[in-house]
Amino acid sequence: MTFTLEPCRCTTYGDRFLADADALGPRREAYRSCEQCRGAGSIAYPCHRCGRRGRRRAQLVVTVANLDTGAVASHQLVPGGLDPHRDPAGRWVVDLAPRVRELAATVGTVLDEAGVPSLWLDRQWRPDLPAAQRHKLEAHAILRADHAPWRLVLGRSTAPATVDPAARLARLCALADLLLLDLVVEARRQDAGFCWAIRYEVPGSPVPLGSPGWCRDLPEVLASTDVAKALTGLAERGLAAPARLRRPDSPRPPAAPAVDVDQLERRVLADCVDLAGGELPGAQALWRNGRWWHTTLRAGEPVETLAEQPTGQVVRRVRVPVSRGYEPPDPLWLGEPVDWRPCPDCRPHSRLRACDCRLGGRAADPDCPHCCGAGLRPSALHCFTCGDTHRLHRTVLVTVTDLRHRVVHLAWQAGTPEAAPLVATQPNGRPVVQLPDRYRLGSWAVVLGARPEDLRDADGGHDLDRDLRDGYVTLPWAGSDPVGEHVRAASRGTAAGRLIVVAAPPDAPPLVELMTLTLGLDLALMVAVCDLRHNAGDPLLADGLRWSVEIKPRDAAVSPDDLPYRPSLAAALAWSRECLTDAVASAAPIDPATPIPVPWSGPRDLVADPEPELLRLATQHAGQVVTVRFTRAGCTAYRHDGGGGGVSLLAEAVDLRDLG
């Protein structure tokens, strides 16, 4: 019928306006005043599994690929070919691990079998059932896994190097000293065991609510947490942390000594028990000032929050915050507090944000239908002005690092007189000025041996804003403080006024490797590039090279809306690799009557690096997007005409060098 009837959200809490988050409703009773189902108790949704087609494909394909050679081998699961066996609990299960190992041997790759799927059949399935009934039950088991109907398992010809927990922990400690951060090792009670996490924090960050992770011991969490993961979420964890200056006479961080991981783990676990033998919520070890500081975690007073639901109900949640039992001494580098003022565009502990009627510095519109003249309206988004820190700092501490051994700490302070010549004017009349090299992070990237386009935020790896890279500032009015506006933009949404920037190329696979894999899978690799280097020096226009790399179905057309936006080919390749398994899963045919391909391909010879030819094409069509589509049949180049003009075919050839 192309739609499903699902229980309404209101049935979770029953027919009550004010409900407890942990209290379920009686027999999934509907809320009579529900704003979604009007008391019916169920809502019709378009079926996302079949895409409103009314049919689904009972087929699952598992493909094993060797990234080094491009060899590919596949196995498909269809009703009648599952070969199930009983597990220790007596259920019939289809274990794909043996078959995946055979495929890995075929393509000569070493795999991590942790992600190999298994299928559980319905309890009604028996080998002595009639074939039609068995196949129907097997089809149901396959359909339960069709959220990813094409699974890609990647490996290499040689086993990856194992992570030495002690070496990784020593590196994380050394980098914490270099970046002026705390390294936190935390164990939190969960069920009958502990969950471990390791992360970076700015000094003064509170203990997060909830479980810190899923790892069951310290070596496991060290094996799964690299520097990038430890930095991810730094701003969110430290939004409420106080901002402090860096002491100019702060001593150099000491060399990180060798760390006994087992001893550290035992000490943290011992701190999870109080002196009377009672159980505590958890414990932490903080690396600060060149040594470990240990502290217990203790439960505080319960905090009650009320949350409005789309159904019109209000849900009461009670959370128990956790705090440290002991706060270690301040870091040696910590200086005076940073001056700040409250953000004028949001309110703490509420969802009120500046209304759109105040954009551009205008006064609140008394006839605004959203805020009724108040100037504030509820919003689920972060405050654009402060990033939900609720503070506008007068000083921001900028750290530029290569995440190895080189680092530069900069202090930008509002009110500092600087020569900032006018370089452009926005269409709305606002002046655009450019600050000196000290405020241009692109110049500091060159000092550290990196390219300006390689700059990215350490928290999440997002590309850096061009204004911060080149020191451009759009002033709200002529004569305003350019450094102050620059500081506000740099500190927006940061932890304790700390902006940490990585000046190093991202860890990305070669384009040739991704192309070889795509051809082995018989898919299409779309590489788009746009040469905007002629816009260099114009702060109102995008500049440099823009790239995108995507894997799509073999017959997918080039869309004029697919525009490149990554600042470097390495950044585009890193993102493509991160989305690789999802891209292959989405390459399955949409029509359920069309089977999923079952690719087989032997080792492929590596082709020449196509980057020089791609740059040549981009230079010939500067200012326009050029997309090259690579398939087994060859390559095809297209030009995006822009302005709604679609795409134009430039040339077709077996090899990119023959496009002319």
Image (tube, helix red, strand yellow):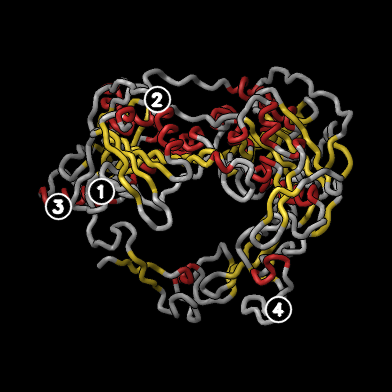
Q: Residue beneath label 2, please?
A: 609
Q: Are the residues tagged 1 and 4 within 8 Å (C-beta)?
A: no
Choose between 537 and 450: the one closer to the eye.
537
Choose between 408 and 449: the one closer to the eye.
449
- 10 Å crowding of disc 3: few (<14), some (14-19), many (20+): few
Q: Is residue 389 above or below residue 46?
A: above
Name the front one of labels 4 and 2: 2
The quarter of the picture where residue 355 lies is bottom right
Looking at numbered disc 2 in the image, what kind of residue is underneath it?
Asp
Give me the C-alpha separation between circle 4 and circle 2: 60 Å
Q: Earlier in the sequence, mark 1 or mark 4?
A: 4
Q: Is residue 173 above or below residue 95?
A: above
Name the front one of labels 1 and 3: 1
Q: Residue beneath label 4, please?
A: 373
Query: Mark 4: which secondary structure?
Result: loop
Query: Mark 1: which secondary structure?
Result: loop
Q: Residue beneath label 3, please?
A: 133
Residue plotted at (60% across, 40% down): 536
Across and down, in percent, residue 553 comes to 29, 43
Q: Earlier in the sequence, mark 4 or mark 2?
A: 4
Q: Are the residues tagged 4 and 2 within 8 Å (C-beta)?
A: no
Query: Mark 3: which secondary structure?
Result: helix
Q: Are the residues tagged 3 and 2 within 8 Å (C-beta)?
A: no
Looking at numbered disc 3 in the image, what kind of residue is underneath it?
Gln
Choose between 75 and 643: the one closer to the eye.
643
Across and down, in percent, residue 150 comes to 30, 42
Give me the C-alpha separation between circle 4 and circle 3: 66 Å
Residue plotted at (54% across, 22% down): 163
